[in-house]
Image (cartoon, coloured by chain):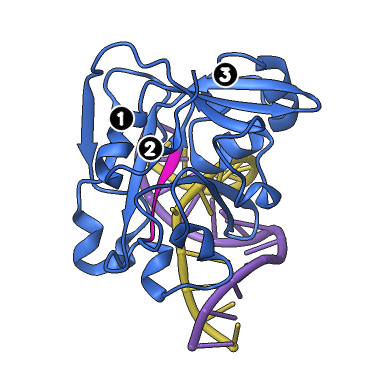
Chain colours: A blue, B purple, C yellow
DNA sequence: CAAGAGATCATCT
DNA sequence: GATGATCTCTTGA
């Protein structure tokens, strides 16, 4: 069962926690890749200086201002992609960054894309997982309720979730300390730092 | 093992 | 013209 539009429309911090434990599914001509969502970060509203939306709506960030349940993909540092899912009602800019998705299906495809054999390094980090899952800028704006990229509702029990401050947002003033990064405790695949 | 630098470019000013 | 929601490799202890 796929997560539906109303799941994504809920408050972002809550969505970020509830996404943990569900399965990201990427359907691609080369094959299907899946993995359990292990680590997320919430980026909430115009006020959040760590969020791209805080500088107002631009062509790049337009997706974040749209309805929930769409993918926001962007290029960072000239070489890496990051995957977000848009949350909250339309016109309220917010999204959840997917930071780690340890591989389940499509292991060999991921290893080939990443040119990396070590399973722990395949998708533990936002840039890594996008490469492993074959996600690039062309997928920005795609509907997560479609058949190319979606999230399977597989969450079993309330997982043991740890909350910390977000990564790489030291420039965001008071917002940098918000405990909006979430990951499942005791799992080896969490991204570094 | 930890720390530091370089790679590299879309996006906004 | 500056900058970044990162990763990898190299260096040095």
A106 w.r.t. A10: above or below:
above
Residue at 31% in and 62% down: A45
Quadrant assignment, res A79: bottom right
Residue A85 seen by the camera: yes
Q: Can you say whether A79 is above or below A133 in the image?
A: below
Q: Give the labeled residue for mark 2.
A: A6
* Membership of A187 in magenta stretch: no
Do the residues indicated by labels 2 and 3 lie within the same chain of the protein? yes
Please report contact status of discs 3 and 1: CB closer than 8 Å, yes or no: no
Q: Residue at x 52, y 65 (%)?
A: A62
Residues flagged by tags 3 and 1 on a common chain: yes
3D distance between C-alphas at marks 2 and 3: 33 Å
Q: Which residue is mark 3?
A: A119
Instruction: Specify the farthest residue to the right.
Output: A29
Q: What secondary structure is marked by label 2?
A: helix
Can residue A193 be seen here? The reply is: no
A178 vs A97, left or right, is left
Q: Nearer the viewer, residue A150 or A122?
A: A150
Q: Position of residue A188 (x, y in %)?
A: 39, 20
Residue under circle 1?
A: A18
Q: Residue at x 39, y 40 (%)?
A: A8
Q: Which residues are magenta?
A: A93-98
Is residue C10 rendered to the left or right of residue A153?
Answer: right
Q: Earlier in the sequence, mark 2 or mark 3?
A: 2
Tag in front: 3 or 1: 1
Answer few, some or many: residues within 10 Å of disc 3's Cα (few below 14, many 20 plus, some between 14 and 19). some
Badge 3 or badge 1: first in the primary sequence:
1
Q: Estimate the spatial distance between the alpha carbons at disc 3 and disc 1, rounded to whole Å.
A: 25 Å
A104 on left or right of A191: right
């Amino acid at each position: 069962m796929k997560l539906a539009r109303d799941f994504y429309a809920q408050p972002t911090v809550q969505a970020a926690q509830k996404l943990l434990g569900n399965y990201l599914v990427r359907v691609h001509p080369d094959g299907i890749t899946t993995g359990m969502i292990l680590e997320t970060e919430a980026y909430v509203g115009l006020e959040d200086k760590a969020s791209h939306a805080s500088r107002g709506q631009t062509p790049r960030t337009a997706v974040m201002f749209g309805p929930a349940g769409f993918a926001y993909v962007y290029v960072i540092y000239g070489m890496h992609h990051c995957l977000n899912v848009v949350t909250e009602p339309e016109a309220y800019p917010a999204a959840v960054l997917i930071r780690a998705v340890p591989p389940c299906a499509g292991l060999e495809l991921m290893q080939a894309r990443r040119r990396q054999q070590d399973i722990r390094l395949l998708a533990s980090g936002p840039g890594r997982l996008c490469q492993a899952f074959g996600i690039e800028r062309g997928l920005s704006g795609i509907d997560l309720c479609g058949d190319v990229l979606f999230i399977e509702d597989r969450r079993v029990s309330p997982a043991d979730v740890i909350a910390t401050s977000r990564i790489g947002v030291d420039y965001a003033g008071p917002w940098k300390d918000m405990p909006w990064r979430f990951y499942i405790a005791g799992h080896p695949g969490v991204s570094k730092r």
